[in-house]
Amino acid sequence: MKTIEEIEKIRSQKREELDLRVNINAKTREKHILVCQGTGCTSSKSPQIIEKFREILKEKGIENVRVIRTGCFGLCAKGPIVIIRPEDTFYAMVTPEDCEEIINTHIIEGKKVERLLCRDIDKTMVERLDELNFYKKQKRIALKNCGVIDPENIDEYIAFDGYKALEKVLTQMSQDEVIQEVTNSGLRGRGGAGFPTGKKWSFTKMAESEQKYVVCNADEGDPGAFMDRSILEGDPHCVLEAMEIAGYSIGANQGYIYVRAEYPIAVHRLTIAINQAREYGLLGKNIFGTDFSFDIQIRLGAGAFVCGEETALLESIEGRRGQPRVKPPFPANKGLWGKPTLINNVETYANITKIILNGANWYNQIGTEKSKGTKVFALGGNVNNIGLVEVPMGTTLREIVFDIGGGIPNGREFKAAQTGGPSGGCIPKEHLDTPIDYESLSEIGSMMGSGGLIVMDDSKCMVNIAKFYLDFTVSESCGKCTPCRIGTKRMLEILERICDGNGSEEDLYKLERLAIDIKRSAICGLGQTAPNPVLSTLKYFRDEYREHVLAYECRALECKALAKIEINPEKCKGCGMCKKVCPVGAISGEVRQPHKIDPSICIKCGSCVQKCPFKAISR
């Protein structure tokens, strides 16, 4: 068990050693090669890159260079990423075969490997991370240590003020003072609903019970979302420390992290972090020599989307099928095993230590009047800079998509953005200048959600998008309440009918009516928000729905049943390529004569459109 003095000694020594990680003017001859080993880069061979670097350095006898695994740097579109500190050189899309050249050219000769330097969207070569447009409008708080420290080394976390907030809380602050600081910060839950964090902590503290629990909701199920996963992979100790602070403030001695088993790297690093914290006496009995004791256990989820709902999550931890409970009572009064339970998600906890160390006033100066701090988004879809971004609340959608995200690929037009995953809504281009905060998104029919942000270009059919999200929700419904179990299924059937060319204008009325009724009557947040993608697309893209049911046309050509594939006889040279690739023999014609498509046979797969060398075939 480490004393306060021993932890402070580690912090001081290690911080001096790691100054080059954050200071490009660090006075040192040592270099650190930082390699992203988050899930995305791991799938692109970053572990092999790390091993290759170490192997080459050993062979060449180079001792003043260390190779460090890190969490996500954020710019996933450029992975695997390698950054060399202190000079902050940013190499993109590195392969194991590039390691030798980086060592020979950069480390030994002192020259940049120009072909591997990251290029911005305007093709400008960028030498340093902070020169990229992707990072210029970001403010990293929850992600502060991701891409900086080795997540499997507790000493590195301690070096960057790790467990200093816990020490402050246990030795200088009362329970009420901690809760008041969190309340004054204006932090709201980052899991979706945006409930004030301090108020939730206060309710749980006031509940009378000899046993209370702290739970971390790491069941991140939105399609395309990976914010919580990246925090757990890159900075697991910040979540452990925050849960301990929460436990102290409400009077709990046991915590649980509920994380889906589909996150093996996150689970692995959490396990290492918990073991390290126990070894140092930062988890367990009498932490920092005080009378406060707290321990944390991991509980694995099977990937059910409904278990992101807090009461369904509690049911799962208790060993039952994940189904939401009727509220009230709320978990703050009757949660895990009937005891008062505090539940926050990963990103919410990731802000706590910074608030304690820097003060509530520092935090509430960031963001908007009612939405304080920053928000992490998983930026995906039809955008150039796919990745993880953290921006102050109030940043506009336009800034995220075009300034940070680098705009839409292939010269296409922005059409919509989906925020909040299956629970959110589609935001059209007329709302590109909407500030991203809880109130503004709600006003235009969307929601913050946990932070998935999917960008769509003008090649997307919004009716098909609504069908995609609803199909996901139907498959993930727990089936407990009739509105969600049956109502969403009926909505999906209507959307399928519309996309198959069998819809009517009456279907639009039925769809809207069903959506409103389900929102009002479903038992939990999953059912109550499931209609949002349908309602928002009906609101902003109703003309596309009408085209589907009145003209039997899909302007984006995504609904195959409504697609019309035709050969332009004036452009067709009769080369026969389309006949060769057609899987059902729907195309006929003589060599050097215009060909024809039999619509009764054509399955509208589009193979002929893609292969025609003369662009004579169109949908």
Image (spheres, rainbow, N blue to C red):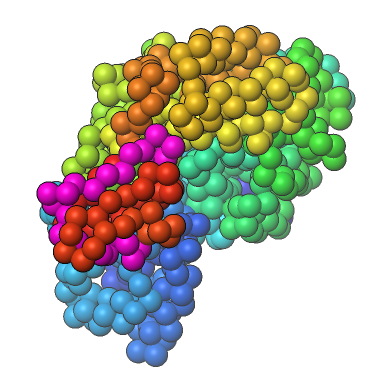
- 395 relative to 487 in the view: left or right: left
Residue 331: give x, y in percent of width and height: 75, 22
- Location of the C terminus by quadrant is top left
Residue 578 is inside the magenta segment: yes
Whether residue 161 is visible, yes or no, is yes
Look at the picture and state if 29 lies above or below 490: below
- 377 relative to 412 in the view: left or right: right
Residue 227 is inside the magenta segment: no
Residue 155: give x, y in percent of width and height: 54, 58
Res. 175 image quadrant: top right
Whether residue 387 is visible, yes or no, is no
Which residues make up the magenta segment? 558-581
- 295 relative to 528 in the view: left or right: right
Look at the picture and state if 573 lies above or below 427: below
- Location of the N terminus by quadrant is bottom right
Q: Nearer the viewer, residue 559 or 82?
A: 559
Question: Exactly how many numbered labels are in the figure?
Answer: 0
Look at the picture and state if 567 lies above or below 178: below
Residue occupying the point 62% across, 18% down: 528
Res. 25 image quadrant: bottom left
Q: Nearer the viewer, residue 477 or 136?
A: 477
Residue occupying the point 54% across, 47% down: 229
Q: Nearer the viewer, residue 232 or 442?
A: 442
Residue occupying the point 59% across, 39% down: 221
Residue 554: give x, y in percent of width and height: 35, 31
Residue occupying the point 69% across, 34% down: 307
- 353 relative to 319 in the view: left or right: left
Q: Nearer the viewer, residue 220 or 430?
A: 430
Residue 600: give x, y in percent of width and height: 42, 44
Look at the picture and state if 380 lies above or below 11: above
